[in-house]
Image (cartoon, rainbow, N blue to C red):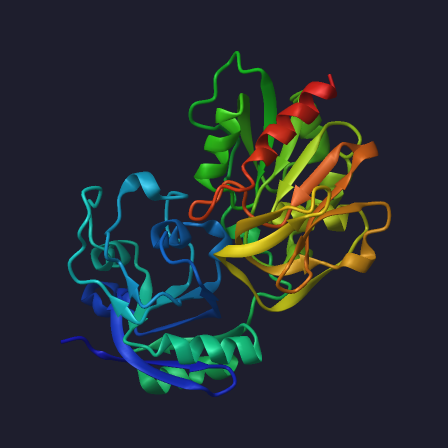
Amino acid sequence: MRDRALLVLADGAEFEGEAIGAFADPEAELTVATGEFVFNTALSGYQEVLTDPSYAGQVITFTYPHIGNYGVNPADSESAGVHCAGIVVRELARRPSNWRSEEGLEAYLRRHRVPGVSGIDTRRLTRHLRCHGALPGAFGTDEVAVRAAAATAKGTDGLDLVATVTCTAPYLAPGSAPDAPFSVVAYDFGIKSSILRRLVAAGCRVEVVPASTKADDVLARRPDGVFLSNGPGDPAGVVGAPDAIRGLLGEVPVFGICLGHQLLGLALDGTTSKLPFGHHGANHPVRRMASGSVEITSQNHNYAVDAGSLEGAEVTHVNLNDGVVEGLKVERLRAFSVQYHPEAAPGPHDAVYLFDDFTSLMEASR
């Protein structure tokens, strides 16, 4: 039988459940955790979500009621570890069943010291977050400490969470061939492994550099193009990144995804703002303005570029749910970006063509 756990949001809303993960591991000696609570609507791909560095500082509520049924395996990880502050589920599978499974999710959570709560009414929690927005809060097995922590819990506004997930030194992406047609420098703001695989598959030799790398250091590598990766938190809190991007614009082709899209917007003198509850899921409809076609996309972000702030940039994609800018480009600077994740993992592959668009832009720039 699991220990009782309590979840309390900063506005006082309370939810009861059972302790899982690090809370249920005596060796972890963890009774309380805090973070910003968000919800993800994907039906599968929980391991990819857990290992996405973009979730740093956040507690993920999975809206799908049954999580962990196919286990976990090393091939599906998007990074070397788990970066989220915790998870909330309706029901955690006790016995995974899948030929690819190498470990149960419960054991995986304990091994990575990820706190969690199961047995929560995730429908009620999701409705609350939709009505009141993403909220900081606390959860754990010590009720007094949880309530105290929830009262002082902070969100992600203004924080440089990228500094907690970026690499510490440059490295070559796995599979990069010395004679690849294109040489790309990728900024690691919290990059996913599947993005690197897509770039390599498109014919790129990819050198990944830390988020603090200056524009001169990038240009000294003489790349054919620069990639701006996804990552966690508030783009306005990423110290130095917009200035570095400004130093690259017009010098080499630039392609950004998610946080990279927002940072490109800031580098173009645009502004960003926080969405009420963000976009987290694998079924967001996005209209491609040039053709009028609709792509079903995978998304994970709490902030967005303000449409009215983008003078001189063309809006290329728009979210059909709420009208948020999902893509932009500046042809004279050979730069473009999208808010969503064309590499998916998890999610549909409707937008995978964007990696070929990047290589075509590099080819045309030679």
Q: Residue at x 46, y 67 (%)?
A: 39
Above or below 261: residue 285: below
Above or below 86: residue 1: below
Q: Residue at x 47, y 28 (%)?
A: 173
**Relative to the observer, which residue lies in front, 289 or 326?**
289
Can residue 29 be seen here? The reply is no
Q: Residue at x 30, y 54 (%)?
A: 112
Residue 176 lies, in percent from the top left, at 47, 21
Q: Residue at x 69, y 61 (%)?
A: 323
Quadrant in the picture for the N terminus: bottom left
Pick out the residue farthest to the front: 292
Can residue 14 be seen here? The reply is yes
Pick out the residue farthest to the right: 312
Quadrant of the image occupied by residue 140: bottom left
Quadrant in the picture for the C terminus: top right
Pick out the residue farthest to the top: 179
**Relative to the observer, which residue lies in front, 230 or 285?**
285
Quadrant of the image occupied by residue 50: bottom left
